[in-house]
Image (tube, grey):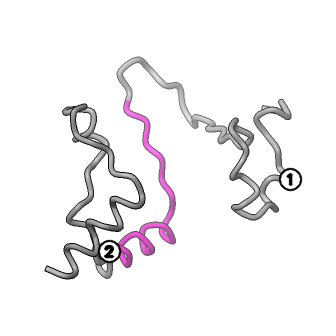
Amino acid sequence: SNDPIYNKASWMDEPVSFFDNIWHGGLAFEYVAISDIKPGDEITVDYGPEWEEAWSNHTQHWQSPDGAETYISPQEFNEDPSIPIPTHDVDNQLMWENIDA
């Protein structure tokens, strides 16, 4: 799209902090099919060998961060809305309690 609302090439040069107060999209991907897409067809994206290698390296060396045992997934929150959402302070308190235990 040539619509400047969805294609702000200048944003590619901005630091991440620039987006702290941006609450609308400005970057978009355009996909071009190399053949007709029929109803029911599965669409896949190939990120290329560099991405595959980086992902493989990540999964082989990844370690869960400290405090991960207190993590509650969005799916868990959606399934049980009564789960209290801890604030940053409460989350830090739980982390220190687990370290002291």
Name which residue type carries label 2.
Pro
Q: In the image, what residue occupies the spot 27% across and 42% down?
A: 84
The percent position of residue 18, horizontal first and vertical second, equals: 76, 56
Q: Residue at x 80, y 53 (%)?
A: 11
99 up-or-down from 3: above or below: below
> Would you identify the image quadrant in which residue 41 lies?
top left
Taking the spot 48% from the left edge, 67% from the top edge, the residue there is: 51
Residue placed at 32% from the left, 82% from the top? 61
Q: Which residue in the structure is indicated by mark 2?
A: 65
Q: Residue 70, position in %: x, y? A: 23, 61
Q: Which residue is denoted by mark 1 in the rendering?
A: 10
The label number, if any, that marks residue 61 in the structure image: none
Viewer-nearest residue: 60 or 88: 88
| Mark 2 closeness class: few <14, some 14–19, many ≥20 residues within 10 Å | few
Of labels 1 and 2, earlier in sequence is: 1
Q: Answer left or right for 32 relative to 57.
A: right
